[in-house]
Image (tube, helix red, strand yellow):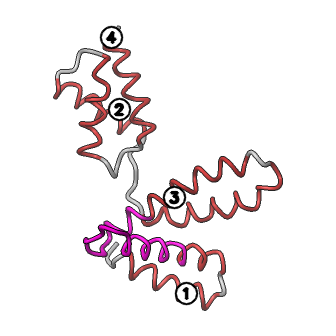
Amino acid sequence: MSTSIETELSNRMKDAMKARDQRTLDVIRMIRSKILEAKTAKGFSGVVDDALYIDVIAKYTKQMSKAIQEYESQGDRGREMVDQLRFEIDYLSDFLPKKFDVEETRAIVRQKIAELLITDAKKSGQLIGAVMKEHKDSVDAEILKNVVQQELAIIAG
């Protein structure tokens, strides 16, 4: 994105107000509220930049993903909320870095196995830590865990 996330959200908020798009307005207002919470949190001394926005949006979408599972268990009663939460996650995904797919993750894991000379399946924590250290924003933790287990199982034979 050429403009900052903050500017982009402000522009989208203006457009949503003009279009009377309540769903979009609600999402943007929620993120702005979460940013304000982060700025006023005890111990916050950082700057408000795209990294803060990405962090807040990532945490929020993760919370909403968990909430979807709870609402889905309610059947028809939770369907409307599930639709709203999915909309929010889809809308906010534009602002998050794209995650590696399974094959891209597998390539990184294989490279790290060779780099760290891992031959023991018990070193999965070390391997996951090394990958996350370099690719935290680009790797889905669940996919990484599964790929590491598969690759170490192959090594263990």
Query: Residue type at mark 4?
Result: Ala
28 is higher (above) or lower (below) than 115: below
Q: Nearer the viewer, residue 37 or 51?
A: 37
Residue occupying the point 30% across, 73% down = 49
Instruction: Determine the residue positioned at 77% across, 56% down.
Output: 79
Mark 2: which secondary structure? helix
Cα distance between the residues tagged 4 and 1: 56 Å
Q: Which residues are magenta?
A: 29-56
- Residue corresponding to mark 4: 156
In the picture of the structure, the residue carrying the numbered disc 1 is 15
Helix, strand or loop for the magenta stretch, by majority: helix
Taking the magenta stretch, the answer to whether it contains residue 38 is yes
Q: In this view, which residue lies farthest toward the right?
A: 76
Callout 3 amino acid: Thr
Q: How many angstroms separate mark 1 from mark 2 (CA)?
A: 41 Å
The N terminus, quarter of image: bottom left
Q: Quadrant of the C terminus?
A: top left
CB of mark 4 within 8 Å of CB of mark 3?
no
- Distance, label 4 to label 3, CA atoms, is 36 Å
The crowding category of the residue bearing disc 3, from other C-alpha atoms within 10 Å (few below 14, some 14 to 19, many at least 20), is many
Q: Please identify, in this view, whether the residue under mark 2 or under mark 4 is nearer the observer.
A: 4
What residue is drawn where x is 32% and y is 70%?
Answer: 50
Q: Position of residue 73 (x, y in %)?
A: 74, 45
Which sits earlier in the primary sequence, circle 4 or circle 1?
Answer: 1
User: x%, y% of residue 53?
Assistant: 38, 69
Q: Nearer the viewer, mark 4 or mark 3?
A: 3
Per the image, the residue denoted by label 3 is 61
Q: Name the image quarter holding residue 154.
A: top left
With 45 as the anchor, is 66 left or right in this view?
Answer: right
**Residue plotted at (31% across, 66% down):** 51
The three-letter code of the residue at mark 1 reads Asp
Q: Residue 105's spot in the image, x, y percent?
A: 35, 37
